[in-house]
Amino acid sequence: MEVVSRKYSHKNTGWRLFLSTIIARAYPRIIGQQREISWMLFEVVMPMLAVIAYVFVYRALNAPEEYIGFVVMGGAMTAFWMNILWSMSSQLYWEKEQGNLALYIMAPNSMMAILLGMALGGMLATAMRAIAVTLLGVWLFDVVFTVSSYLQLFLVFMLAMVALYGMGMMMASAFLMFGREAWHIANLAQEPIFLASGFYFPIKSLPFWVAAGASIIPLTLGMDAMRQLIFPTGFKFGFLTVGTEIAILAVLSVVFIVTAKILLAYIEKLAVREGRITESRR
Amino acid sequence: MQTSTSWRSFRMAAWLGWVIESNWTDPFLFAVYSIVKPISGAAILVIMYGIISQGNFDNALFPYIYLGNAFYIYVGAVMTGVSWAVVDDREHYKTLKYMYIAPIHIPLYLLGRGVARFITGSIAVFITLAAGILFLNVKINFAEVDWLLFFTTLILGVVMLALLGLLLAGITLMTVRHEGFIGEATAGALYIFSGAIFPLTVLPEWLRPIGYFMPTTYWLELLRRSLIGNVAQAFPTLANFSNLQILGIMLGLSLFFGVVSIFVFRWCDSIAREKGLIDRTTNY
């Protein structure tokens, strides 16, 4: 009895509680999700089907080999966008539907820490799927990557991820106010984003202002910069220089995370006031 | 009595499906939602084609890709529409058990639930085609369209897709946690093997027989031929077959898959009842 009470008498507070909340929320994403092997399989197979279809379209058109590489890279990055839509933006909505959201708010932890945990766990788990898609693509279609700067590539990828998951945290707050619309809105934000962000073709092919507008989605500039850094002729297809894209991604990272914090506090208050925390609109 | 039960099951399911699909928002947002997704999907292909061909939309490959992609919307919509009803009713609304104890015919109920997706799919197909004709130089001469072949093929194909949806619904009944993926994965695989957006000859030789065994391959070929005639016949995949021969093959394969679907659904349904899977929820 004494052992039990000693164990539970210890309480984390302050930054320790913040950190342990992040780890606790990331845990089911990193460890728990891996227990359902069939999910992993489907999450790799689904983007691969699109990759295969688009690669064969380029082959039918006798496109230069770089385009096959662009498609494989775009297919791998779709895993991150799908994760943002279905496991970040919609997550608080799902939690509400399952009755967990009220528990999150009641518990003495920071909601921001929960969102950061979701982001961290989602990013790591999705990275494994993205790597699997890339390796499969390389193996099936003989794609050759030639990295011109590992440092810049690392910087671009990390900044794109921070900005993207910051955006996901921001959208999660907005989705908290949705009912049944959440599912449809997330569903709607797939193909149009694949189009505007140039998942399967260089963004430079779009009119300048369309590409500039699409740059609000961090993957747009992230993929554009990565294409310039990992394909020998990639710079020919670049929308902006890699340095400019890194700077914009850094700004987007800060803006999205700060906005997520402000928005979360506001929406949480609003949802509590309007009684939407426990509401389930089927 | 049997007929009235069957008709009522189908009719009410169709209405229920339509309400679920459409009443989550106002009509304007619903219209935007129904239009933006398919147009974006088509636009990805148009841009890919435009970049490589440097804007030469007169090549026969362009209408081949565009029409194949446009009509393929039906595959995802109808097939997944029928099978998704199981996930929706069992996991989300938790009403599938009530449907099973109600005086309705379950397979017809599920087929009816697919009608709403057929309607929204038809709107998407129409808009995609209209955009192609108006803005992208997809040349369809309405005076030369073989309307009889077009509508015969379209109707047969939709029935075939609905029956394939029933097959997936049966498998979905027996599956836990990843039912949502089944329809999408099947539609995604058929997208590759049906020659929807590239001629089957682009596939590695050892994969082509899968495409030749799929009724959707012949369905898409006939739809293209009925609308643009010789342009579609320019590709070697099925160039040696006449329209009637392709229609016959499609009919035969549709019958085969239809019969298989009905038997698979019955078998899955009986197993699901036996194992108590009808009211099982696995965290939607």
Image (spheres, coloured by chain):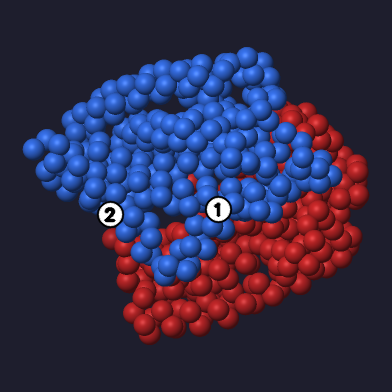
Chain colours: A red, B blue
Residue drawn at 37 percent across, 33 percent down: B159
State the SS at label 2: helix
A183 to the left or right of B94: right
Q: Nearer the viewer, residue B44 or B2?
A: B2
**Chain of the residue under label 2:** B
Q: Position of residue B268 (x, y in %)?
A: 27, 28
Residue A38 shows up from this direction: no
* Mark 1 burial class by Cα count in 10 Å: few <14, some 14-19, many 20+: some
* The furthest residue to the front: B143
Tally of numbered discs: 2
Q: Is residue A209 above or below residue B116?
A: below
Q: Which mark is residue B16?
A: 2
Residue drawn at 54 percent across, 57 percent down: B35
**Chain of the residue under label 1:** B
For the residues labelled 1 and 2, the Cα–Cα distance comes to 25 Å
Q: Nearer the viewer, residue A240 or A226?
A: A240
